[in-house]
Image (cartoon, grey):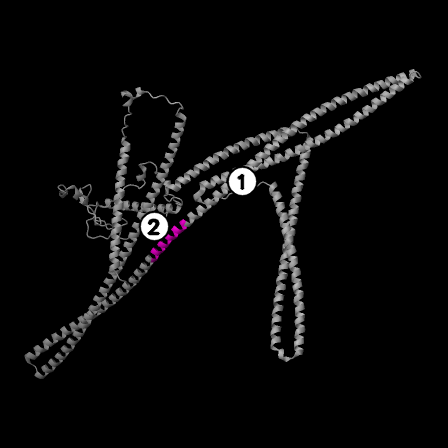
Amino acid sequence: MDETVNRPARDLKNFEFTPIGYVKEKQNGKRTNGPISDDDHGIPRRKTRKMSLDDSFNSTRMFNDESQLEETLPHVRQEKENTNVDKRNLMQELSENAVTSNPLREQQEKLHKLNTENYSLRLKCNSLLKFLNSVTDQGELKKSLGLLEEIQEWKQKFEKLQGEVLKLRDANEQLQLSVKAPQLATPPDTKEELERLKERYAKLEEDTRAKHEQNQIKIDMLKSDLNNLNVTLATKNNDLEEKERKIERLRTQLEEFDHRGSASLLELERSLDLKNDVIKRLEDDLAKLEKLAKDKDNDILEFKRIIKRKDDELSKQSVSQVRYTQQEKVIRDKTEEVRRLTERNRALDQSINQITVEHNKLERKVADFQHLKDELESQKKELALARTKLKEAEELSARFQSQIIENTTKNSEKTSQRVKEKELEINNLKDQLRRLRQSQETLLQKAKADDNYEIEKMEREILLLKEELKVIEESHQRELETWKSKCDSLNRENERIVHQEVGSIGAMKKNLDEKLSEIERLNKFLEQLRFEKSDLAEKAVQLQTSKDRYKEELKKIVSKFEHLSKEYIKLREKNETGGDDELSRSFREKYNSMKQRLLDELKVLQQENLALERKLMESKGKSVENGTSARRSNTMSQDRIDYYKLKYHTEVKQNDDLRTMNEYLNRVLRAISQHVRLDLMKIRNEVDPELPAYLAQRNQYPFAHNLAPLQRPKFKTIALFVQACVRMKQAALRHRWDQQRIRYLQRKMALEDDRVTW
């Protein structure tokens, strides 16, 4: 602890603070003791992340939503392999027997590593999901601007259409009110006539449906007849082919049996004539059948034309509804607009149909008025007949008066009463005539006024409705054509984008399949090496057991040799004390022979032992070589995996950065365009047409130098700026470390590829 007092600050980075004091940092088993040395010097040691990556976007307070990571796929849990290689620094340890740290620190580091690995896996999943879901986001600013302009144009068109729809609704309401008013005033006779007309219309529809069904049945019958005729034609053709084959056979037989005589030739000619007659008959039948088929085809065509006419008539009477299908997920907004406009078009069609119904009603009313005119004319004729009758009555009265004047002298008393009666009758008739004339004149005036007014009104309404119908149909057709063209273009663009996505996904799948096949090949090679290693280990165990057995035999032989040597010493002592020379000589010879035999056995056992030791050493060397090669292949495969992981992470980060830049630029452009529009509107509203005149007094000292003071920046803006700079520096350092790691792995793989031979 006292050593750290006089140390400089740069040497304290290898120590860590504990409650007792500074202790040397623990050497992590899954991490190297120092940074990987590269061409660049003075680079700080790579550190672990202590905050979320989302905090780098919180400074602008624009991307603090986690909903931007579209988690459309389920989270895949990856089991962590218990290897001695870290995900950040994947080199093995260069030194061993490092000093351990306190357990609290170790647990904290493990927790931190697990959290960082979990976060990196989540980022991988989210980046892959973003890459798969990004259809139109290719970082092209022109396309996005074009789409924004198109959206604005469609919004303007939508507003125009809304205005037109409101106008049409107002006109429709006015028409309904104008139609309802005379309907209320119409007598019950017209209502009955309308009901009768409706019943007639329903009957006509039923008749047309029945006719259509009958025509369909006839068509089916004709089709079945046609099929039967086709079957008969096919059978006749087959018969013809068979007959032709028989004729060819007969001809060949004729050519073969020409030398046999004229009798056979005559018979063959007769048979040929018969066959030719049969062929002619069949050809006539074929021609008749073909004529029948043509007639049936013509009948079918006529029936089809009739059906088309009926369908056209029914389609004119029925409501034409246009439905548009929804497009892909990528063009949802546009498809929704298309759907809304189709609904509006449908509403317009319904309004058009209502207008046509009202037009038909008005035509029926005109017919009713014509009927009333006919009735008035009939009444006029009746009045004319009444006038003629009145004239005849006046003539009769004149005759009666003349007769009265003539007969006054004859029978004055009798006729006086009659004259009075006749005068009374004449006066009554005159009163009736006057009343009839007055009623006739009033009726004529009313009928003329009503007829003229109603006819003019109906004609005006009919003209207006016809013009509105034409305008609506033309606008409807134009809108349909424009929307159809727009839908076709959107479909083409969608297909192009789908093809591009399929190509990119296919390329990625191919790369992944290649990598997986390479990993499988390496795994197979590893398994083979493991099997070889296990075989060698078994052989080594067998050799060890045989060596132990030989050692035990050698020990037994040595013990026997020692026992014999002891007996020899005893015998020699006996011989020295006093024994026969012959016995000693014989024992000596026996001893020498036994000694020689034992020495030979010893030599043989030693040679066998040496051979076994050599074999054991060779097997150990082979196992070591296989282990080193397997270890080397493992390190090579691990280095390749780490290299491709780092490359993948860099590409994902770059794609995420480009996507965020694109989104930020799109938002900025939208905000700028909105501000520019608002400023233009303010300028149009605020600027007066008559500007004030220029005054030289305003160029004096108090006005010329009366500038607004500069606003002092807030502490929050400066702090956010500093935070952004620090984060940018950290991101640059991380990128630099990743690039160094990639270069190191490239060099390492190149060296191992040059060195390793399979």
* Labels 1 & 2 near each other (Cβ < 8 A): no
Instruction: Give the x, y percent position of residue 156.
Output: 46, 35
Does 572 sit left or right of 670 as displayed? left
Does 431 sit left or right of 188 as displayed? right
Q: In what element is the residue under mark 1? A: helix
Does 494 sit left or right of 82 as displayed? right
Q: Residue at x 65, y 42 (%)?
A: 205
Q: Which residue is drawn at 42% across and 40% down?
A: 147
Amino acid at circle 2: Gln
Give the Cα separation between the discs numbered 1 and 2.
Answer: 58 Å
Q: Badge 1: how crowded within 10 Å, few (<14), some, or many (20+)?
A: few
Instruction: Give me the disc on residue 78.
Output: 2
Residue 54 colored magenta?
A: no
Q: What stretch is highlighted in magenta?
A: 500-517
Q: Quadrant of the N terminus?
A: top left
Residue toward you, 558 or 372: 372
Residue toward you, 35 or 166: 166
Q: Earlier in the sequence, mark 1 or mark 2?
A: 2
Judged from this view, the residue extending furthest toward the bottom is 582
Q: Mark 1 points at which residue?
A: 477
Amino acid at circle 1: Gln
Residue toward you, 643 or 620: 643
As drawn, 382 above or below 290 = above
Quadrant of the rendered structure where residue 398 is?
top right
Q: Quadrant of the C terminus?
A: bottom left
As drawn, 222 above or below 481 = below
Q: In what element is the residue under mark 2? A: loop
Q: Which of marks 1 and 2 is in front?
A: 1
Residue toward you, 315 or 213: 315
Q: Can residue 556 be seen in this view?
A: no
Instruction: Give the x, y percent position of residue 468.
Output: 57, 34
